Image (cartoon, helix red, strand yellow):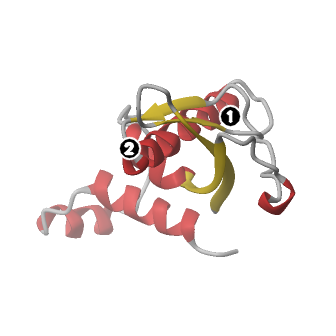
């Protein structure tokens, strides 16, 4: 999954700051004390909502064309950039054990060099996932 761009509506909150809604992800609502905080909260909230949909095997909604959204009088449109892989790397810390087989000579050479097998495998998998097909 590449970067996604979802339109969000930023509404001025009566108590100050902003509250944020997403037309394409109605269950996703958040707020922030100022524009920067509201944007950061919007990214995290969007990530949580999309990850939840993914976990529950629900489809990830396509993002609407921002030019077709007419904000209410108290709101303005902001496009939120979202990278699911970066979000998962930042928030997902649960490790999963995997068993793998490599040639004995490769194991011995890597061990003699003090290489971290888990780290190298993670880096290789991330590079493979991020590379264009």
- Residue for point 69% across, 39% down: 22
Q: Under tag 1, what secondary structure?
A: helix
SS category of the residue bearing label 2 = loop
| Disc 2: CA contacts within 10 A as few (<14), some (14-19) or many (>=20) | some
Q: Is residue 61 above or below residue 19?
A: below
Residue 1 in view here? no
Residue at image position (41%, 37%) is 92
**Depicted 118 relative to depicted 107: above or below:** above
Relative image position of residue 130 (x, y in whole percent): 55, 67
Q: Earlier in the sequence, mark 1 or mark 2?
A: 2
Q: Please identify the quarter of the rendering in which residue 105 is found.
A: bottom left
Instruction: Work out whether residue 35 or residue 28 is closer to the camera in this orientation and state it.
Output: 35
How far is the residue under mark 1 from the one under mark 2?
A: 30 Å
Q: Is residue 57 visible?
A: yes
Q: Position of residue 24 (x, y in %)?
A: 77, 40
Where residue 7 sits in the image (x, y, percent)? Answer: 69, 52
In this rendering, position of residue 83 left or right of residue 34:
right
Residue 55 location, quadrant: top right
Circle 2 sits on which residue? 34
Of 17 and 37, which appears nearest the observer? 17
* Residue 66: quarter of image: bottom right
Q: Which mark's residue is nearer the viewer, 1 or 2?
A: 2
- Left or right of residue 70, residue 108 in this image: left
Q: Residues within 10 Å of mark 1 (few under 14, many from 20)?
A: few
User: Which residue occupies 31% across, 51% down?
Assistant: 118
Which image quadrant: the N terminus? bottom right
* For the residues bearing labels 1 and 2, Cβ distance under 8 angstroms: no
Extreme bottom residue here? Answer: 132
Horizontal side, residue 24 vs residue 125: left or right: right
Residue at the spot 28% in from the left edge and 61% down from the top edge: 107
- Give the residue number, with chain letter if any, for mark 1: 54
């Amino acid at each position: 999954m590449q970067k996604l761009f979802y339109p969000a509506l930023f509404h001025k909150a009566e108590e100050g700051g902003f509250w944020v809604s997403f037309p394409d992800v109605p269950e996703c609502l958040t707020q922030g004390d100022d524009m920067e905080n509201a944007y950061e909260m919007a990214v995290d909230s969007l990530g949580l909502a999309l990850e939840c949909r993914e976990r529950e095997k629900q489809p990830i909604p396509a993002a609407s064309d921002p030019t077709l959204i007419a904000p209410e009088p108290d709101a303005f449109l902001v496009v939120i950039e979202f990278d699911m892989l970066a979000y998962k790397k930042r928030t997902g810390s649960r490790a999963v054990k995997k068993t793998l087989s490599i040639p004995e000579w490769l194991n011995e050479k890597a061990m003699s060099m003090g290489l971290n097998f888990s780290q190298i495998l993670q880096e290789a998998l991330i590079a493979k996932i991020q590379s264009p097909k």
